[in-house]
Image (cartoon, rainbow, N blue to C red):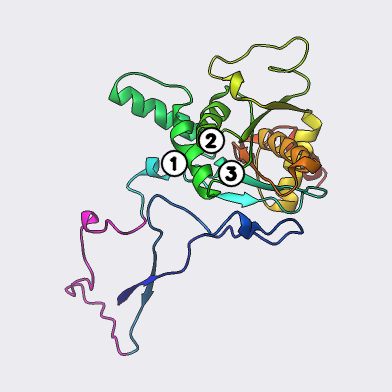
Amino acid sequence: MIMALSSSSCSCFSPSTTSLLPRSHFFTTQFHRNKPCIRFRRTISATATVSTASSTPPLHSTTREGLDAVNIAEDVTQLIGNTPMIYLNKVTEGCVAHVAAKLESMEPCRSVKDRIGYSMLADAEENGAITPGKIHFETTGPEIWEDTIGNVDILVAAIGTGGTITGTGDYLKLMNKNIQVVGVEPADRSIISGDNPGFIPSILDIKLLDEVVKVTNVEAIEMARRLALEEGLLVGISSGAAAAAAITLARRPKNSGRLITVIFPSFGERYLTTALFNSIYEEVQRM
């Protein structure tokens, strides 16, 4: 048995063609990773014979330490981060800017909170200190900068605790002060904007925000449904809200040809009991 390396790219998220400016303007490579992506293809010689004798030694044997080059995680914590980015194509009608989503829904536990949890534990182990937003400054921001080769123009993220948009936005503005950071909040309970702003999370750095876009629950749920049906992306309601805001920005003439990055923080599975899946639930009940 021969173990052969394949030099093909491991990215399954290649951008498709749109009527906008060519995406090659932004990307010269398909994917970026901290470690080399290696595929293994096993082939058997036509003249090789297979023996079932238990005394036959394995054709290839080595220790895990001797496999440094393979792309195999040592444990689940090594799967956190480096989430893929993908262009939105079907839900972007009328847009003059490109919209690319960062799929935090593909973290091991299907949420952007994987980064936070790991960061808290790592900090606690090292020195007992927990630094909010630090993990997004150190990972999410650099990943977006690397994946877009520095061509990101606008970052869009929902405002929850404020850690994601603060850490990511802080890094991107450090790399390019002209990058706009846009927060997304529910229209029915404004946190930042409005005449009577509500409780502002201590983690959130308001000075980083260039704009705050309000999205209704109806708009968020409808967009999350469209993302599942039209883009094949099963994401949550907060991701639907972020996408709706990003598309609003992408339709503005002044953003023509620009690259908008939107963070999808969680997977849709955890929203099965919410209004997002009411229509499916009702249909099943009628069966």
Does residue 119 appear in this view? yes
Image side of residue 223 versus residue 78, left or right = right
Provide the residue designation for mark 1. 80
Q: Earlier in the sequence, mark 2 or mark 1?
A: 1
| The quadrant where residue 38 appears | bottom left
10 Å crowding of disc 1: few (<14), some (14-19), many (20+): many
**Residue ID at (71%, 32%):** 274
Provide the residue designation for mark 3. 102
**Amino acid on which disc 1 is placed:** Ile
- Name the one closer to the observer, 263 or 142: 142
Residue 160 is inside the magenta segment = no
**Residue ID at (43%, 34%):** 138
| The quadrant where residue 28 appears | bottom right
10 Å crowding of disc 2: few (<14), some (14-19), many (20+): many
**Amino acid on which disc 2 is placed:** Leu
Counting from the top left corner in percent of width and height, residue 262 is at: 64, 40
Provide the residue designation for mark 2. 172
> In which quadrant will I find the N terminus?
bottom left
- Name the one closer to the observer, 186 or 192: 192
Q: CA distance from mark 1 to mark 3?
A: 14 Å
Q: Earlier in the sequence, mark 1 or mark 3?
A: 1
Q: Circle 1 — which element?
A: loop
Residue span colored magenta: 47-71
Counting from the top left corner in percent of width and height, residue 271 is at: 66, 35
